[in-house]
Image (cartoon, rainbow, N blue to C red):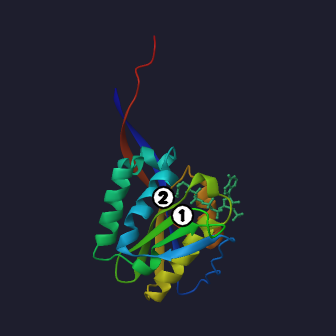
Amino acid sequence: MRTTKYFRRFRMEFDLMHQSIAKPVLPEGFQWVAWHPAILESHAEVKSRSFEHEIDTQLFRSLTNIEGCRRLMREISLHHEFVPDSTWLIRHQLNRNDPVESCGTIQGVKRSRLVGAIQNVGTVPEHRGLGLGRALVLQSLLGFRRAQLSRVTLDVTAKNTLAVELYQSIGFRLIRTMYKEVLVTREPSMA
Ligand SMILES: CC(C)(COP(=O)(O)OP(=O)(O)OC[C@H]1O[C@@H](n2cnc3c(N)ncnc32)[C@H](O)[C@@H]1OP(=O)(O)O)[C@@H](O)C(=O)NCCC(=O)NCCS
C-alpha cells in the first residue's frame, strides 16, 4: 500500500561575514584529501557507507546504494556552481604499512552569487564521535570563505538530532522549517 509521509527538515545558515570559524582539527592518523575528479569513487563509497541505515535514505533514494551515490557525486562535481575548495575527503592510516581507508566526505556548491550550500556530510560508522564530522563542516566553511561567499546553508532532517546539534554548536542557526513529501510503501496491517 502506497502512502504519503512528511519529513520535517530544517534549513540552517552560517554567516561567514560575522561569525568566526574554529580551526578544523583531525585526530592523529587522519588526513585531508582535497577534491580531485580521480577521488570521486572514494567520496561515493564513503557517502554510501555513511548514510546506510540512516534516516535520509528514507527521503533520498540515491543515498540508498553505491550507484546512486556515484551519480550524486557526478552531478555535484559537474554542477556549474561546484565549489571544489569546500569539498573534502578524510582518509585514515595509523601506520605507514596499514591500508589507507577513506572515512569522511563533504561537498559544497553555490546556491547563488553569495550563498554556498553544504551537501551530504558523512562519516563512516566506525569512526564516529572522534570529531571528523565537526572538522569536515569547519573545513568546508573555510573553503566557502576563501571563495568569497557571505553565507552558507545546509538542510537537515529534524529527527537527525545528532547532526542538528552538531551544526548548532558550530554556529548554524535555524532559518526555515520545510516538509519533504515522500511516497512510502506500507505493509498492510494484519486484521
Ligand atoms: C552526523 C555525522 C556526520 C557526525 O559525524 P561524527 O564524525 O560522528 O561527528 P563528530 O565526531 O564531530 O561528533 C559530532 C557530535 O556528535 C556527538 N556524537 C557523535 N557520535 C556520537 C554517539 N555515537 N553518541 C553520542 N554522541 C555522539 C559528539 O559527541 C559530537 O558532539 P560534541 O562535538 O559536542 O562533542 C555522522 O553521524 C553521520 O555521518 N551520520 C550519517 C549521515 C548523516 O546523517 N549526515 C548528516 C546529513 S545532514
Q: Earlier in the sequence, mark 1 or mark 2?
A: 2
- The residue at 44%/89% (across/down) is 148
**Residues packed near mark 1 inside 10 Å, few (<14), some (14 to 19) or many (20 plus):** many
Under circle 2, the secondary element is helix
The quadrant of the rendering that contains the C terminus is top left
Under circle 1, the secondary element is strand
Of 101 and 162, the residue lying toward us? 101
Whole-Å distance between the Cαs marked 1 and 2?
A: 6 Å
State which quadrant residue 186 falls in: top left
State the residue position of label 2.
46
Is the C-beta separation of discs 1 and 2 under 8 Å?
Answer: yes
The quadrant of the rendering that contains the N terminus is top left
Q: Check disc 2 and give the amino acid type.
A: Val
**Residues packed near mark 2 inside 10 Å, few (<14), some (14 to 19) or many (20 plus):** many
Asked whether residue 89 appears in the rendered view, the answer is yes
Task: Check residue 104 in the rendering and tell me which mark sits there, or answer none.
Answer: 1
Ligand 1 near label 1 (Cβ, under 8 Å)?
A: yes
- Residue 160 x %, y %: 56, 52
- The residue at 44%/47% (across/down) is 57
- The residue at 35%/58% (across/down) is 70
Q: Check disc 1 and give the amino acid type.
A: Gly
Of 166 and 135, the residue lying toward us? 135
